[in-house]
Image (spheres, rainbow, N blue to C red):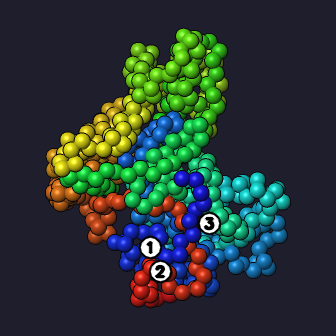
Amino acid sequence: MTGSVPVASSLSDIYTIDALGAQAKRWNTLLTRFQTIYGQPAEFVARSPGRVNIIGEHIDYSLYPVLPMAITADALLAVSTNIASTNVKEGHYKIKIANVQDAKFPAHEFDIPYDAVDIDATVHEWTNYFKSGLRGALELLRKKHGDGFKPKSMQILMDGTVPAGGGLSSSAAFVSSSALAVMVANGEKTVDKTELTELAIVSERAVGVNSGGMDQAASVFSERGSALFVSFTPSLKARPVSFPKTNPELTFLIAQSFVTADKFVTGPIHYNLRVVECSLAAAYLNAVLNPPGTQLPSDASPLSVSLHGFHETYFALQEHSSGATSSKSVQDQLEELVSLTEKTLDKKEGYSREEIAAVLGIDVDELNKQFTSRFPVRAERFKLRQRALHVFSEALRVLKFMALLEQQPANTDDTTEYNAQLGDLLNQTQDSCRDVYECSCKEIDELCSIARKAGSYGSRLTGAGWGGCSVHLVPADKVKAVKEAWERDYYSKLELTEEQKEAAVVVSKPGSGSAVYLVEDRGPVVVDDRISDGLRMAGH
């Protein structure tokens, strides 16, 4: 799935047919607002979607494969580079950025020096996500064009429909779309998907979030109609995965809890802390189980030390010492690691900094320098056992889920048993997220319980957790019953606006990834260039 980000000639290249009407109206509103704000038309629109993760939760930053899919909700950036040089300070370029939701996200104007992009990660400001994409894109452009490269000024209008804090990767969609916009604005005719994904992964960490790589890969690489199997070692790779035909037909429902889970705000006690705990678990297991002096490889994980790195190192050393001529299967290795973790990390209450430092043979200051200084965390004890157990068992569930997809159902006339096997793996993930990784919340637990009782095969949180969204594998003939049960037993008890009620539950189909739309004729967006121009929406 390597290649370049596609340039769309119409909205039908981006969205499914059922979404075209609403999206055409939205895009034309965006372009009309752009003209009103800046007094000139946009030159292009950069688009990157949110995602829902089917299985593989909280293991991407430990470098284990995951299975997400893109959704229709996305981040759009309409862009023009037509800014008079007389309005730009010497040695700088200008960024004017506004948001369709201007009451919530006020417009800003920045004069940025050619050689640096300043981001204050301690301030929760919406434009930081654009700046992080800008910084990453410019680093890549300088590698291509030399240190003397001078970025172009940009006028931007952003419209995002991925709910912030909803567990559907609004930040990754915004950062990926921002980086793409900067690349195109600065003359890149083709933007490599792998390069865009890798720079977006690193860029998002500039806003203080220890992100893995799943969200950005799903946003950039996804193809309509397919989920995406994303692996991170030895290098980033993504390939489309189709679900087999089933009877009853399978449907994915995404249900909002309306508990906001902001990774930036709660990172020190939730998301970032889990990243640190996983890296500490890797270092601890290495110190105890591998020969003295063994160094784990520096890898692409946020803290450069991962459980996957320990996994590979441990079995490579085992095979070398035993003279083995063949390797165990990855599934057998993961099962062994679960057993080893249970025996080795026996303190369920967690480990103090002093206890971990003693095993690693370093002092506490060095421990903090290596593991807790890059991103702020707050914890007295680190639950290494629980975090490692979740990661290894979840990586195992991903393999089992993929094996089921690839083997196809035995009885195609009635796949109820096959469907239930897929759903059971999702239920196991939710149990682990709730009890072992401790990243669920009572509202998500309740949504999952209601859905299962109403006919869902499998229900679990999706995204970072601690609120946000849940994903449910539901037979098509039970969708109505599940939605009615949620309304009766959950949503009716909340004070929701009409807009929230409409967005509460989404029937999700795998969507397409990042794209660029060139506004060449300065007219209404082309909805579908394969059929009558009557579908063009008036109003621009």
Residue occupying image coordinates x 62% and y 86%: 39
Per the model, the C-alpha gap separating discs 3 and 2 is: 24 Å
Mark 1: which secondary structure?
helix
Q: In the displayed structure, would residue 528 be above or below residue 231? A: below
**Res 189 quadrant in image:** bottom right
Dot 3 amino acid type: Ala
The percent coordinates of residue 460 (x first, y second) are 31, 44
Name the residue tied to disc 1.
Answer: 12
Q: Name the residue under label 3.
A: 181
Q: Is 431 left or right of 284, judged from the image as shown?
A: left
Amino acid carrying label 2: it is Asp
SS at mark 2? loop
Dot 1 amino acid type? Ser
Q: In which quarter of the image is residue 25?
A: bottom left
Q: In this view, does 206 lie to the left or right of 71?
A: right
Contact? badges 1 and 2 (CB < 8 Å)? yes
- Residue 529's label in the rendered image is 2
Q: Residues within 10 Å of mark 3 (few under 14, many from 20)?
A: many
